[in-house]
Amino acid sequence: MTNFLDLKGINDSFEPELSLAIKRVLDSGWYLLGNEVKAFEQEYSAFIGVKHCIGVANGLDALRLILKAYITMGEMKEGDEIIVPANTYIASILAISDNRLVPVLVEPDICTYNINPRLIEEKITERTKGIMIVHLYGQNAMYPKIMRLVKKYNLKLIEDNAQAAGAYYKDKVTQNCTEHIPGYTSRLLNNSLTNNESDPGQNCEIKRTGSLGHAAGHSFYPGKNLGCLGDGGAVTTNDDELATVIRALANYGSTQKYVNDYQGLNSRLDEIQAAILRTKLPRLDTDNQRRREIAQFYLENIKHPDIILPTRNQELSHVWHLYVIRTANRSNLQTYLSDNGIQTLIHYPVSPHKQKAYMEWNNLSFPVTEQIHSEILSLPISPVMPDKEVEQVVNVINKY
């Protein structure tokens, strides 16, 4: 049986360091707001390339706190609008409506599954205060056009980086950048492909997702590329004031014990999860590269007229949190794969505007979103997936 995601295998691959990290926390006797969280925040902010990282309880809280902080700072108010992709996981939208802001849905690009930058400007009104881009399935969603709109209309750019830890955005790139990428190697599955060996040149500028906007929310849910052993999340930003307010809001609105400046929340990353994340972070680029190798093998070898593969040429900008295909008869394909020992999942079967939680949207039409949600199927992919299982997936699909 080829499991969709072997979480136990992933965590076992970090032993004995993982168990030692947990024991380190247990032995310390300090379980919240301690040295492990401080160290992880420093290490993760350096990894992303920003000044500030604030550990929080989960990815949804990270987005909630960013928006709550902007309201607290007087930069947004109830009823203001935030543009968000229509096909995102519902958490992106929940963070907006939870703050009594108005989510404005924009269709995705059918090729990338990310927000279509050409459709954003027509949705901007006098009440628009921000754009939330979602790096869905692990692929960078940023485009120069989005940044031009952010500057033109003086908007906040918020990244939902829950699925794309470690992905890159190439800005003003004129030549190949791969030699600058930690963990990037030319080894591909069965050596079927080779890397571009060209000189990276002097004009190569790359940034991590999570550092592209004014603030970003991150999730460390166990199944993520960088996952802990429970819930966990973080906010990254270069904005000093925003970071200070978010840190306070996440701790009951307090910067000093029993002194509460804001009406805050209790949303903190705990010491054990931080220690686990510190253990896993140094290998993230290498693990993401293994995901790229598997994805590339799928791209090169799955050949079936009824199956639409993801778009190519995403070498650096995609960390393949999910490898998502499309087919018109998804249920038949999923049953066939299951019968042949291959586990798949659907991310996500029901689009947000068709959920009961947002009944007021149920009659709206987003045809691209609806098509995606009715056709997508996620294939197995993980950094510990052996070559023989990757090959099995390909062989079984090609015989469908």
Image: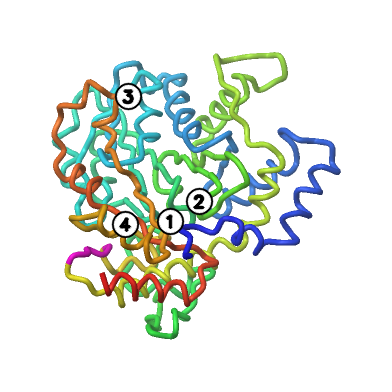
- Residue 238 position, x and y percent, is 50, 41
Residue 92 vertical position relative to residue 139 in the rendered view, above or below: above
CB-based contact (under 8 Å), mark 1 and mark 2? yes
**Residue 321: which disc?**
1
Q: Residues within 10 Å of mark 1 (few under 14, many from 20)?
A: many
Mark 1 → mark 2, Cα distance in angstroms: 7 Å
| Circle on res. 357 | 3
What amino acid is found at the position of numbered circle 3 in the picture? Ala
**Gap in Å between the C-alphas at discs 3 and 4?**
27 Å
Whichever of callouts 1 and 2 sits on the residue coming sooner in the sequence is 2
- Label 2 or label 3, whichever comes before in sequence order: 2
Q: Which residue is mark 2?
A: 224
Q: Nearer the viewer, residue 342 or 301?
A: 342
Position of residue 153 in the picture relative to residue 383 (left or right): left
The residue under label 1 is which amino acid type? Answer: His
Q: Which residue: 54% across, 40% down?
A: 234
Q: Find numbered disc 1 in the image and state the secondary structure of the residue it sits on.
A: loop
| Relative to 370, 272 lies left or right | right
